[in-house]
Amino acid sequence: MLLAPHMTVHNPSGTISSNIFWYNRWDLYLNQPGRTQDEITKIRGDVDRLRRKIRRLPWRDKAEQVLIRYYNAFAHFDLEKSFLDGWKLLEFIGGDEGTKGDTLIKRAAFLSSNPTLSKEIGMHLKHRRNLISHGRSIKDARNETLAFQMKSFVRPLLETFLTNPFNFEKEKDIWEFCDLPVNKTELDKQAKLLATAQKFRDQ
């Protein structure tokens, strides 16, 4: 986590623990060198591979719309609009029209490296989205954070939607996959029940 350049540290009661400012040096982040030719070549190769995968998708037409929506969402100068369009992108790839927000969050979190933490972030984003939708705009200083959180949150689901690594035949298969339990014990239990049901029907 990259903290702000200046901050205060507080006790659990809310009082300031020390009457000083803490700060972080950002020099390494502000003076990044440009892309090397090898990095540029790798990026071009990644783009070409993505294009080939999209051409083979059963939902190719929608995938092309998704790329346009992704670009439009996160190219805004207005970061509040960027955040809201990012949420609309989640709705577009995370389920049918009318899919509830909690379900969208669960599906996006399922594909992350830390589903529990990702789900908490998703609930936070949903709360912020609801506040904005009801006319309670957020402070400008927080818009950038929300926009980047939204971009990071939707990315695993976006990548799965565009590359189809599990060779699903329909969009619905992705959603059903993401609706499975995160916990391995629960997955094993469900697999055993399905195997038992299959055996029962085959008799």
Image (cartoon, rainbow, N blue to C red):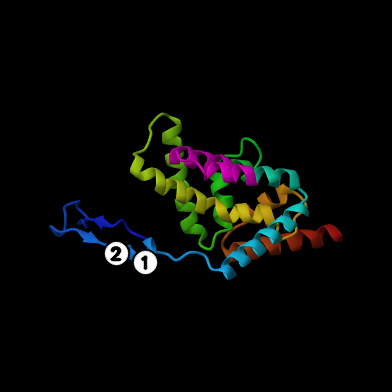
Determine whether the residue tagged by mark 1 lies in a helix, strand or loop.
Answer: helix
Q: How many marks?
A: 2
How packed is label 1: few (under 14 Cα within 10 Å), some, or many (20 or more)?
Answer: few
Q: Is residue 49 magenta?
A: no
Q: Farthest residue in the bottom direction?
A: 38
The circle drawn on residue 28 is 1
Q: Is residue 78 magenta?
A: yes
Q: Quadrant of the N terminus?
A: bottom left
Residue 88: quadrant of the picture: top right
Determine whether the residue tagged by mark 2 lies in a helix, strand or loop.
Answer: loop
Q: Is residue 189 visible?
A: no
The circle drawn on residue 41 is none
Which residue is nearer to you in this view: 20 or 90? 20
At label 1, the amino acid type is Leu
How packed is label 2: few (under 14 Cα within 10 Å), some, or many (20 or more)?
Answer: few
Q: Quadrant of the C terminus?
A: bottom right
Q: Are marks 1 and 2 in contact (CB under 8 Å)?
A: yes
| Relative height, residue 179 to residue 84 (above, below) | below
At label 2, the amino acid type is Arg
Q: In the image, is 71 to the left or to the right of 79?
A: right
The circle drawn on residue 25 is 2
* Residue visible at 78% across and 50% down in the picture: 58
The segment highlighted magenta reads 67-89
Give the Cα separation between the discs numbered 1 and 2: 8 Å
| Relative height, residue 111 to residue 41 (above, below) | above
Where is residue 41 shown, x and y percent of the image? 62, 66
Q: In the image, is 172 to the left or to the right of 185?
A: right
Residue 12: quadrant of the picture: bottom left
Magenta span: predominant SS is: helix
Q: Is residue 142 visible?
A: yes
